[in-house]
Image (tube, rainbow, N blue to C red):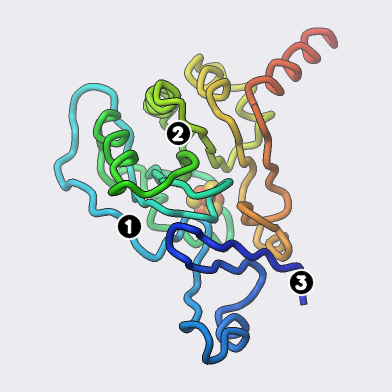
Amino acid sequence: MSELTWILDPATGELTVEGLSEAEASALAGDLLPPARPLNCARPLTTQPLPSRQETSGLTLRVAHLYHGSVVDGPGRRSVVQTQGCVHQCRGCALTETHSLAGGVALGIEAIVAALLDAQGEPRDGITVTGGEPFLQPVGLLALLQRLKAHDLHTVVYTGFTLEALACRLEPEVQAALKLIDVLIDGPFVARLSDGAGEWRGSRNQRVIHRPGALMEVMRSDRLQQK
Ligand code: SF4
């Protein structure tokens, strides 16, 4: 059996087990616990209804889903915004509904922040921005991160790009966003590397990078020295 991760949510008493199939978890639970339900990063059991009205002015992000109380999208218990639009085409992606650049709902940044912080008093260790591909919307992503940091919130961002690829992007918003991220989980999903990916990651090639802005600065200075 592969390594298992057990996460007990103190707010709900729910037990999340990583590394078991639904059938294996149900067999282990026997008659003592309710039947297991499958749960993946960025694939919650329930999501918050989104307003149907598209925001057409001001700073916006195109959003696929919003949800609370996730224990699998970064450290602790998190509220999550899942952005709409992705170009990576990872084979085996479980989130194909987030790929269309025209799907989801365009929401104002203030409305997203209000929805993320409105979880009926539930405890929260931070906010996760996942996709889709958040870095396809760097202006909106930066504005969202700035607002989250104004609330002193811990931020995790998932991206199908590597940090090296993002560090080469010319838009100033990309560089500024990286500096506001506490943890970046980077790289595409690679199905053949999914076994044993461990907490928060979909596949073993993805990296959990703390303070990616600082690492980006080191990479840039190394590049300059090599010229
Ligand atoms: S980056 Fe994420 S959403 Fe996009 S194709 Fe890959 S797994 Fe799917």
Find residue 2 and name its label: 3
- In the rendered structure, the answer to whether residue 210 lies left or right of residue 70 reads right
Residue 109: image quadrant is top left
Between residue 155 and residue 134, name the one nearer to us.
155
Residue 204: percent from left, percent from top: 72, 54
Sequence-first tag of 2 and 3: 3
Number of on-image labels = 3
Indicate the secondary structure of the residue bearing disc 3: loop
State how far apart marks 1 and 2 are (Cα). 22 Å
Tell me if mark 3 has few (under 14), some (14-19) or many (20+) residues whose alpha carbon lies within 10 angstroms of its own. Answer: few
State how far apart marks 1 and 3 are (Cα). 30 Å
Q: Quadrant of the C terminus?
A: top right
Name the residue beneath numbered marker 2: 136
Name the residue beneath numbered marker 1: 47
Instruction: Identify the residue at horizontal 42%, vertical 29% (top origin).
Output: 141
Sequence-first tag of 1 and 3: 3
Between residue 96 and residue 155, name the one nearer to us.
155
Hey, what amino acid is under mark 3? Ser
- In the rendered structure, the answer to whether residue 150 lies left or right of residue 62 reads right
The residue lying furthest to the right in this view is 226
Residue 204 showing in the rendered view:
yes
User: Which marked residue is nearer to the observer: mark 1 or mark 2?
Assistant: 1
Hey, what amino acid is under mark 1? Thr
State how far apart marks 2 and 3 are (Cα). 35 Å
